[in-house]
Amino acid sequence: MTLIDGKKIAADIKGELRERAVAFEERCGKKIGLAVVLVGQDPASQVYVKNKIKGCSEIGIRSFSHYLPDTATQAEVLQLITELAKDENVHGILVQLPLPKHLDAKMLLAAIPPQKDVDGFGAENIGKLALNETSTVACTPLGVMELLKRYDISVKGKCAVVLGRSNIVGRPMAMLLLNADATVTVCHSATENIREECKRADILIAAVGKPKFVTADMVKPDAVVIDVGINRDECGNLCGDVDFEAVRNVASYITPVPGGVGPMTIAMLLSNTVKAAERLFR
Ligand code: NAP
């Protein structure tokens, strides 16, 4: 069994991005910039935003943080996004989800111009992904594809099973695998015989948000198992959607939690931001 080291791959990618950020600055006379918008006090969101800002400074790009109170109105958030959309120092805009319930996330995300939509959540980018056209792809599934690529794990012709169909992970993950010529099955809460579906997978991607959902008897021997989940177990410890200790004995490759997909998400956000800036000055 090979442990997929997302932390190391993410560090390698950040090194590559740092060089591109320097080259951009030399060529264009300004730094690449990412605007991060956080509304409210959600503790998990605060940690994610802090790590994203740290990632920016690690590769030498500017971050512009905008913290709004959870009382911020739709009009106030919309106005901020509209200003960031026009700002020439901002190449990427990230609105941290989830937003407080009184805000219309769909409408706010739609206000981000597709070329600055570095999270790849906007309809234009998702549509292009569905059409297998060049697009900015959601960071977590993009990070999974990058891990597979850097470990020389071929996807073409393989049976891939994706657990979860959220707009930010499962759905784009399935489209990426399909675009890479895998035969893809997507499972969700209404799927019957989920165990049997999983057991057929050469590549199993778990993104359900349920601690240790994938047990060893659901995994085909020598399958590649990618764990996207970030959960707390009954003792409050961080764990994925996969029962790691049991499944590692069955899988050929497996990602740990933490240190697997998580670091890749930030690396891909930075990569999408660098690409967005480079596209403007091509
Ligand atoms: P989500 O929006 O809650 O979606 C969960 C998906 O799992 C849904 O499609 C749901 O099906 C499905 N599901 C739930 N219970 C199920 C069950 N018992 N059997 C089969 N399918 C089931 O979650 P998400 O945003 O995609 O995130 C999934 C996990 O990934 C979470 O643990 C999250 O924290 C983690 N995550 C990690 C990263 C990272 O950087 N590593 C990034 C994003 C998310 P329905 O559609 O039928 O409801």
Image: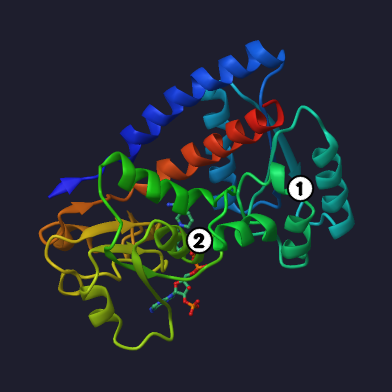
Left or right of 144 in this view: 172: right
Residue type at mark 2: give it. Answer: Pro
**Which numbered tag is attached to residue 172?**
2
Question: Which residue is painted at 38% across and 60% down in the image?
Answer: 232
Picture quadrant where residue 243 is located: bottom left
Q: Nearer the viewer, residue 266 or 244?
A: 266
Q: Is ligand 1 closer than 8 angstroms to the Cβ of mark 2? A: no
Picture quadrant where residue 74 is located: bottom right
Left or right of 240 in this view: 99: right
Residue type at mark 1: give it. Answer: Pro
**Which numbered tag is attached to residue 21?**
none
Circle 2: element type? helix
Q: Nearer the viewer, residue 6 or 128?
A: 128
Q: Residues within 10 Å of mark 2 (few under 14, many from 20)?
A: many
Question: Which residue is painted at 45% across and 28% down in the image?
Answer: 14
Between the residue at mark 1 and the residue at mark 2, the CA separation in whole angstroms equals: 19 Å
Circle 1: element type? loop
Question: Which residue is painted at 65% across and 15% down in the image?
Answer: 25
Left or right of 123 in this view: 148: left
- Quarter holding the C terminus? top right
Return the residue at label 1: 113
Q: Is residue 37 visible?
A: no
